[in-house]
């Protein structure tokens, strides 16, 4: 029996409700170093369940990418190149064009008229915009189910093989591991793997999040990030 228009609308509405509930769920899977599921963890809503501002994300990425670039090209003008200041020839009587300096851009080995100059171009995001962009990036990853929790980082042996096995088990293209602090063994185990990177929680930025498919947090890193971001907001209020 064909469904009525009312029934179809009701099913669509129920489907939207189910999808919305799923995307707002901030309970994520916890994995061991062997890539096995060992439990679940709850992410703080203030950081991973915020409003996603795509325009702000794009602006933040542009700022980070620009600040990575170096504007080092530099050419010399006619006042900077080496050469005599003597007038090439007399003004009149030779039949040639009028010239003053051999360092003029028209001559070989002369200065460059409108060449590039070394300059430091650095963009800055206000603190509130930087914080909002970070929350947008983390919330977007959490909504897509690409934020996970990693357990047992303190037991990392420093061997590349251990991290490669984790990468294979999770079946992800590239992974960002966020730890509570600098872990020498963790850094050593990932440095030869081009698709996995490890950083401390205080080095986390929008560009790193966007550049990686999946973000793996340690439980301690989530707690410290929450303390840093949510705690400061409460103090300012």
Image (cartoon, rainbow, N blue to C red):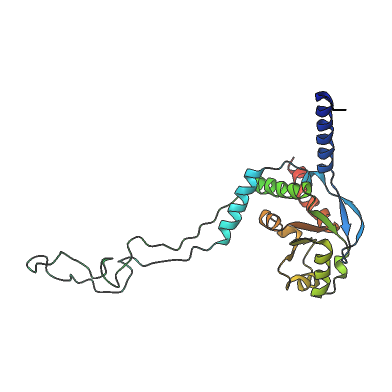
Picture coordinates of residue 159, whole percent (x, y): 81, 75
Asked if residue 224 is positioned above or below residue 157 in the image, the reply reads above
Residue at 38% in and 62% down = 115
Q: State left or right for residue 54 relative to residue 44.
A: left
Picture coordinates of residue 35, whole percent (x, y): 87, 63
- In-front residue for pair 10/28: 10
Residue at 11% in and 65% down = 91
- In-front residue for pair 171/160: 171
Image quadrant where one finds the C terminus: top right
Q: State left or right for residue 4 relative to residue 194.
A: right
Numbered-mark total: 0
Residue at 57% in and 58% down = 67
Picture coordinates of residue 178, whole percent (x, y): 77, 60
Q: State left or right for residue 41 relative to residue 91.
A: right
Instruction: Classify residue 188 by image quadrant.
Output: bottom right
Picture coordinates of residue 1, whole percent (x, y): 88, 28
Asked if residue 11 is positioned above or below residue 189 in the image, the reply reads above
- In-front residue for pair 26/228: 26
Instruction: Classify residue 90 by image quadrant.
Output: bottom left
- In-front residue for pair 114/161: 161
Q: Is residue 96 visible?
A: yes
Q: State left or right for residue 180 relative to residue 108.
A: right
Asked if residue 179 is positioned above or below residue 229 in the image, the reply reads below
């Amino acid at each position: 029996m064909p469904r009525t228009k009312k029934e179809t609308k009701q099913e669509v509405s129920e489907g939207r409700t189910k999808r919305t509930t799923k995307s707002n769920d901030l309970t994520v899977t916890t994995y061991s170093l062997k890539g096995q599921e060992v439990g679940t963890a709850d992410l703080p809503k203030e950081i991973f369940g915020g409003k996603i501002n795509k325009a702000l994300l794009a602006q933040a990425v542009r700022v980070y990418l620009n600040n990575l670039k170096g504007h080092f090209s530099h050419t010399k003008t006619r006042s900077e190149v080496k050469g005599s200041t003597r007038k090439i020839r007399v003004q009149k009587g030779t039949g040639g064009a009028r010239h003053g300096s051999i360092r003029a851009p028209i001559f070989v080995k002369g200065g460059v008229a409108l060449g590039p100059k070394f300059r430091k171009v650095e963009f800055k995001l206000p603190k509130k915009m930087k914080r909002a962009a970070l929350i947008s990036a983390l919330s977007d990853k959490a909504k897509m189910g690409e934020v996970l929790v990693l357990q047992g980082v303190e037991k990392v042996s420093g061997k590349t093989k251990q991290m490669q096995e984790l990468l294979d088990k999770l079946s992800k293209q590239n992974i960002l591991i966020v730890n509570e602090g600098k872990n020498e063994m963790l850094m050593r185990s990932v440095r030869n793997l081009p698709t996995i990177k490890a950083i401390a929680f205080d080095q986390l930025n929008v560009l790193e999040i966007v550049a990686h498919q999946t973000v793996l947090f340690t439980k301690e890193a989530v707690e410290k990030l929450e303390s840093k971001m949510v705690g400061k907001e409460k103090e300012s209020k």
